[in-house]
Image (cartoon, helix red, strand yellow):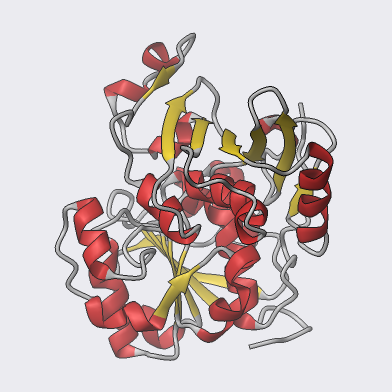
Amino acid sequence: MQGTSGPSVKAAIIGASGYTGAELLRLLTLHPLVSVVTVTSRQFEGKKLTDVFPHFLKSPFSELQFEPYNSEKIAKNCDVVFCCLPHKASFPIVKELYTINPELKIIDFSADFRFKDPKTYEEVYGVEHSAKELFGKATYGLPEINREEIKRKSIIANPGCYPTSIILGLYPARVKGLIDTSFPIIADSKSGVTGAGRKASLSFTFCEVNESFKAYGVEGHRHAPEIAEKLNLPAVRFTPHLVPMNRGILSTIYFKTEAKKEELQEIYREFYKDEYFVRVRNSPPSTSDVAGTNFCDIYVTKEESTGLAVVISAIDNIGKGASGQAVQNMNIVCGFPETTGLELFSNWI
């Protein structure tokens, strides 16, 4: 699919009217090798994209109209499909599209193909999976740990936003055997409200969220098994929090280690030195440093008195935590330079 003069890939976005769909469209306006030819939305079917999202006026996609989902049209006319649907809603569509066109590249934003075993998915999400036969065609779409598999597979399971920040924060230490797994591994994450999606809900209205800060999923969150599986850990004590900001995740992660602070810092720098989208920092990052980008900023240190390493990881939850990562995955499966369309830096303020 690689090309150099004008768009060479035709893409469809299923469920394009949510936050991740809109962010994906924003990023793809900057991509010289991709043309979005179809956007679907049940809620806004028949409406022009710019009537729903006026900020796309004068963009390359300003003439697009939200269409009903048509599997035949999408599977036969597109090279890449982004499926921006929630778990359970996604796997029937992925199955249908793959059946029509096995050459299609599908990037799935849901959790439906993230686990190695469909039984694990069914246990975690409480849903019977009716596309089990496709698990062999799918792989986990976190490029920094799984790039070669992504190149070979047809279905790319875009990771969860929290798992992205935590897995990248722990991966070098885990690979190097520096984590003492006899002690709990604790991940404490704060997320902006876009992580809850665009659907109206009382819990996420202004007065419910503004000037407030709360934990949720304290007794068990479904992202915890995803994190544990990808890091090959028995468990991770993960607690998410909702904070009154639009976008961003800041994760603070603790683990017991014998390694010294300087050793940890050198290992992290060396491990990620060739990863454009991971920036190992000399000081703790903030969410404003990565807002609107595909970067994951990481800081690692150690408190010698407790023997605990502390990793602080910052991402944009709808950037590297969703749509930015999806574009990165698309670049990989299409043979494009991985940074194409993603060389963006935060507005900061």
Q: Is residue 28 above or below residue 208?
A: below
- Quarter of the figure that contains the C terminus: top right
Give the image location of residue 280, x and y in percent: 79, 46
Give the image location of residue 331, x and y in percent: 65, 73
- Quarter of the figure that contains the N terminus: bottom right
Give the image location of residue 109, x and y in percent: 42, 59
Q: Nearer the viewer, residue 324 or 314?
A: 314
What residue do we see at 25% from left, 83% from top? Answer: 133
Give the image location of residue 329, x and y in percent: 58, 69
Residue 212 visible, this angle? yes
What residue do we see at 73% from left, 79% from top? Answer: 6
- Using residue 55 as the reference point, say whether residue 277 is left or right of it: right
Q: Nearer the viewer, residue 152 or 218?
A: 218
Q: Is residue 234 above or below residue 117?
A: above
Q: Is residue 139 above or below residue 245?
A: below
Q: Nearer the viewer, residue 40 or 202?
A: 202
What residue do we see at 66% from left, 37% from top? Answer: 311
- Using residue 297 as the reference point, say whether residue 189 is left or right of it: left
